[in-house]
Image (cartoon, coloured by chain):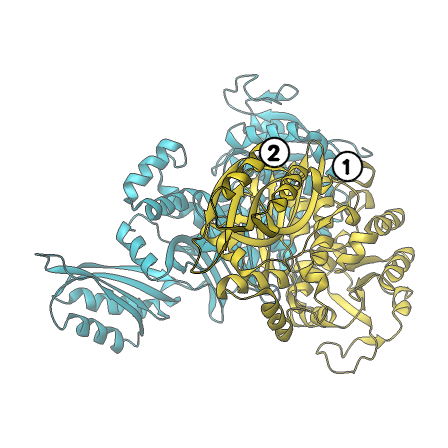
Chain colours: A cyan, B yellow
Amino acid sequence: MGLEPVKVGLLGLGTVGGGTVKVLSRNAREIARRAGREIRITRAAAKDYQPGTIPGTESIEVTDDAFRIVDDPDIEIVIELIGGYSPARELVLKAIENGKHVVTANKALIALHGDEIFAAAKAKGVMVAFEAAVAGGIPIIKAMREGLAANHIDWAAGIINGTGNFILTEMRDKGREFGEVLAEAQALGYAEADPTFDVEGIDAAHKLTIIASIAFGIPLQFDKTYTEGITRIEPQDVAYADEFGYRIKHLGITRKTDRGVEMRVHPTLIPERRLIANVDGVMNAVLVKGDAVGPTLYYGAGAGSEPTASAVVADVVDVARALTTDPDNHVPHLAFQAKDLSDMPVLPIEDVETAYYLRLQVRDQPGVMARIASILGDAGISIEAIKQKEPQENEVEVPLVLLTRRVNESRMNQAIEKIELLESVKGQVMRIRIEHLDG
Amino acid sequence: MGLEPVKVGLLGLGTVGGGTVKVLSRNAREIARRAGREIRITRAAAKDYQPGTIPGTESIEVTDDAFRIVDDPDIEIVIELIGGYSPARELVLKAIENGKHVVTANKALIALHGDEIFAAAKAKGVMVAFEAAVAGGIPIIKAMREGLAANHIDWAAGIINGTGNFILTEMRDKGREFGEVLAEAQALGYAEADPTFDVEGIDAAHKLTIIASIAFGIPLQFDKTYTEGITRIEPQDVAYADEFGYRIKHLGITRKTDRGVEMRVHPTLIPERRLIANVDGVMNAVLVKGDAVGPTLYYGAGAGSEPTASAVVADVVDVARALTTDPDNHVPHLAFQAKDLSDMPVLPIEDVETAYYLRLQVRDQPGVMARIASILGDAGISIEAIKQKEPQENEVEVPLVLLTRRVNESRMNQAIEKIELLESVKGQVMRIRIEHLDG
């Protein structure tokens, strides 16, 4: 190799940190053949690391003080794999202040503090790369930021949380309850002891926030991302969706409209013939619609030790390559030049328009359907399909399922309020948004 | 914008050339917000161009002599969209000689003359970008070359010819004959008047040759790519595949084995539950298996005016960004540094191992199955499944369909020769390879 090895400092030796050491050591020669130089982790920081437990760490000096690494003048690139907000934020800002480039897999950090971090990096002329923060090993940031650079992006929709997709897939394949599958996912190690981040959509919302900024050139606005989890989905919803030719997926969706940008994470019915409807188990996929290219889809493992390490190491190679570029010519962090970000508003969820799946528990008596249809009709909501089960012996209540055409969310909410007041309707209306993903 | 506009010369104003002008003009501001500078086509070359027929060409000086553009000292990047070998090759080499960077969509040129072109570019320190040459608008070159840079690639398999995939999809959806669907594809403009390049797999072989080089760091070896078309596939093969839970796709496959690299394009049965089996119509998709990331898939439009232009323009933005990079730090043309290419041999098709679908026309009489099974057994070929249709009234011959386990191709050829000699077997054995794409 003609060029000097790049000296890298690694913060964190957990699942992804360990994977990064393993991949860089196993594929060292192949990576150097691509990068034109050796990528060498010289120092790593980890609390309570037991020497020898990760192959490839033999030649790495391990310290328990991460700040010693970001202050080390020999280190050119810092990989942050500690996760969480603090001290990750302080370490990244300190590394930047010291003129180092940063690679991170920390979606929460980027979604919440990215604007501050990117501004600091721009001032110093260093790069902050975060491919691993969205959809693990899938090179989705690179695809959107560089591969689709010619396009006006119309929208993007992604299955960007593997745990949630595993649970929905199992519910469909085996007709099982949410809680039961979640317990199994926890036993298998797919879900955390506290599954809130995954099943309530917070993890997906972090990633969607980043996707939206890259798609449309807007600042990171996690607090404006609408987030709804999958905990209320019942096996019967999965089964009804199937009968209508749909799958239920937990999607992150962002779309540019004339009135603003939609940013939302929620369970969604999508037609089963769409490729993304067939992305099952823990796998992730992001569908991106550009005005020139049309729909494109990117699929792969969204989490895990080596898939995430794959993205981390690709970023390190990219940064190493760009070391000799004029900073004005770096790929901008959020796809668009920092001074060219747009202040386009984010659309409140009430102003978003989608089609709907509605499931109601109704008394099996004449006139019920007419009353519901008239409430929807008065609100200007068109019904596309209706299914009502025959009551079994002795049953007085039956489920009624409706698919509607596209309507503004606040109007749908008002109609649902009125429907829930009907004496013949029991309990709450189950409401799931529908996206056809064909526009 | 802080940086000067990049001056681009465009060779060819046909389908893709026109799309490139349109996309660059329609999305000019958005592209400049990403690239940090304006991308300006100042001159274009086209034979018999009627001024005003393509919107966006008003400010472009159109000449009918392409060599005037590659010799123009003001032009920094030349886009070659003429296609074919000559004068495309001479123009590209001249542009390089003149110190210009080149962007091309010409898969035939790269697959056959890429090594010569890249060597010339390396000597001059200029870039040759060719994202549009493989799978149209899908950023597959970028994904493999940069996004998966950390991986040892195990194999890649792609649906990389839209015409062929449209024909196979129609044959399956409507149970129609190959010839009938081909005629319709020609009427719709999906297939050329001379469809040989598409249906015989030559176009796919050009693209697969490029994919293999990028995956494994080997020189471009189009002449060693095994190529088999889809013209012999019958509706009954599509139907039998369905019954066994498979789809027939025209795949380009490349795989690294201990004995060499497989490079082959042929009809292939793949399990219907694989995502790539559900890629229908004119769409393309490439499945890439890396040792760290696992399987990843990239899907989108593989041809057409604006999808291909999307890739062309993305390359122009990339090249514009890298103008200030030390040439040693450019992304290498074939993913690996030129001096680090490998001389790993390409495996002859006879040495390739796959499972097989066999369809025979046999006399409906006792002992036939036993004779066939014993030929296969003697050759060490295991049978995984058998299906024999009941004869209809007056029929003396019936189709017999077999699925085998994996076996070396030359051994299978020998067994088929013996089977075809059996008196109770009529005509030739129809043989289609099976890939499970799960390894």
Residue A296 image point, x, y percent: 56, 58
Residue at 33% of width from left, 39% of height from top?
A: A182
Instruction: Identify the secondary structure beneath mark 1.
Output: loop
Query: To which residue does mark 1 refer?
Result: B345
Q: Which residue is mark 2?
A: B379
Q: Say which amino acid is labelled 2.
A: Ala
Chain at numbered mark 2: B
Is residue B81 visible from the viewing direction of this image?
Answer: yes
The picture quadrant where one finds residue B187 is: bottom right
Q: Position of residue B310 (x, y in %)?
A: 66, 63
User: For numbered disc 2, what is the local secondary structure?
Assistant: loop
Residue A150, image x, y percentages: 66, 63
Q: Depth check: B383 or A274 in front?
A: B383
Q: Is residue A97 visible?
A: no
Residue A15 vertical position relative to residue A380 in the rendered view, above or below: above
* B437 or A24: nearer the viewer: B437
